[in-house]
Amino acid sequence: MLSSDFIQAAAHAAGFDACGVAALGELPAGVLRSFCEWLQRGHHAGMRYMERHLQKRADPRLLLKSGARTAVVTLLSYKPLRRQPPHVPQVSCYAYGLDYHEVLKQRLWKLLAALQAERPALRGRAFADTAPLQERYLALKAGLGWLGKNGMLVSKELGSYTFIGVLLLSDEVKSNTQEQKSRCGACARCVNACPTGAILGNGTVNARLCLSYATIEKHANPLPDEAAAGAEANFGTAKEAGAPKSEKLAAAGYVFGCDICQEACPWNRCAKVAPHSEMQMLPQLLTLTAADWLAMSDEDFEKIFEHSPIKRATLQGMKKNVRAMQPWPTPYFQT
Ligand code: SF4
Ligand code: SF4
């Protein structure tokens, strides 16, 4: 039988920053209910894939043909060494480097191979944000952190700038970790920092109001009226919380994703910086100005972003976001 200690050592050897093990079963009724309510309220902003395969989401054991019994949950940090300069269109730092789906999958397969070398009868399947899995809930169960008020998994050591990769295994493995209690306490910095009021305070985000969704999935920056009204209403809260209005408005500097709520989180200040070369910034992101984006050809976009998550937004979508964002405000981080 595999031990959690062996799996964690193999995960570190495969290049992960943290790893925990959780027994699989049906999702607790409360967790499933909140997810369904989130869908019913339309807070998934019509992302249809979130609605599919509800049965598997409710019982992740079904995701392995022979039946999964254990989730090995891994974290890979992407906290950047440096940020983009203030004068260029801002990209969420998860997209500075290579596409995380690929990076995570390679490491998960390496980990699975190491476990199968020890136990050849083991069956497993790797997931990198590609299946109806409640990854953050599994990470919580595996003792890797707690769920912050902005819905992100927060790790004491790594903060919330982490990707979650999951291996589902056919074997039962005894966990050596315990679920952690939330360390958010009375803090609400992420909630107050969000320029559009998208964070609902119960650990969920209304994607319809979120800049990340708007810039990646919709190419709809500036935000629709609903979100603009949220930003307006939030200025009062921001003032009370000591955040200058300019910081709130700086949200407009994003053309792909948004890091504002994560940047506000105190746990990210002391978090370790990702030592992974795949996560480091593409050099072009240091210099591409709004004018450069608008003049970019399809060939150049394909060449520069071939292995980047930014490819998802398409060049047309990026240009739309860039056009909507001018004139350029001061980004949040450098104020
Ligand atoms: S990513 Fe940006 S817009 Fe979305 S919840 Fe966080 S701060 Fe708000
Ligand atoms: S900013 Fe505060 S409330 Fe939000 S996740 Fe971080 S610690 Fe929790």
Image: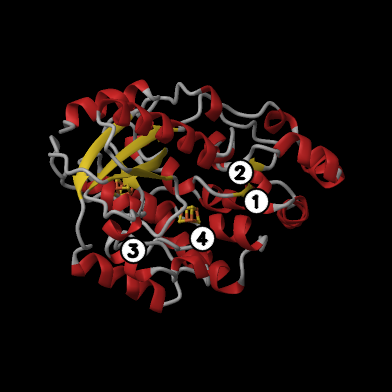
Whether residue 105 is visible = yes
Secondary structure of the residue carrying numbered label 3: helix
The disc labelled 2 sits on which kind of residue?
Answer: Pro
Whether residue 330 is visible = no
Q: Nearer the viewer, mark 2 or mark 3?
A: 3
Q: Nearer the viewer, mark 1 or mark 3?
A: 3
Q: Quadrant of the N terminus?
A: top left
Residue drawn at x 22%, y 40% is 21
- Which residue bears the numbered disc 1? 312
Q: CA distance from mark 2 to mark 3?
A: 25 Å
Q: Looking at the image, do the residues carrying marks 1 and 2 touch, with CB atoms under 8 Å apart?
A: yes
The answer to whether residue 169 is left or right of residue 173 is: right
Residue 4 drawn above or below residue 45: above
Q: If you read the primary sequence from the N terminus, does the residue marked by circle 2 or circle 3 appear first?
A: 3
Residue drawn at x 57%, y 51% is 251
The disc labelled 4 sits on which kind of residue?
Answer: Cys
The residue carrying pointer 1 sits among few (fewer than 14), some (14 to 19) or many (20 or more) residues within 10 Å by Cα, namely some
- Which residue bears the numbered disc 4? 210
- Which residue bears the numbered disc 2? 309
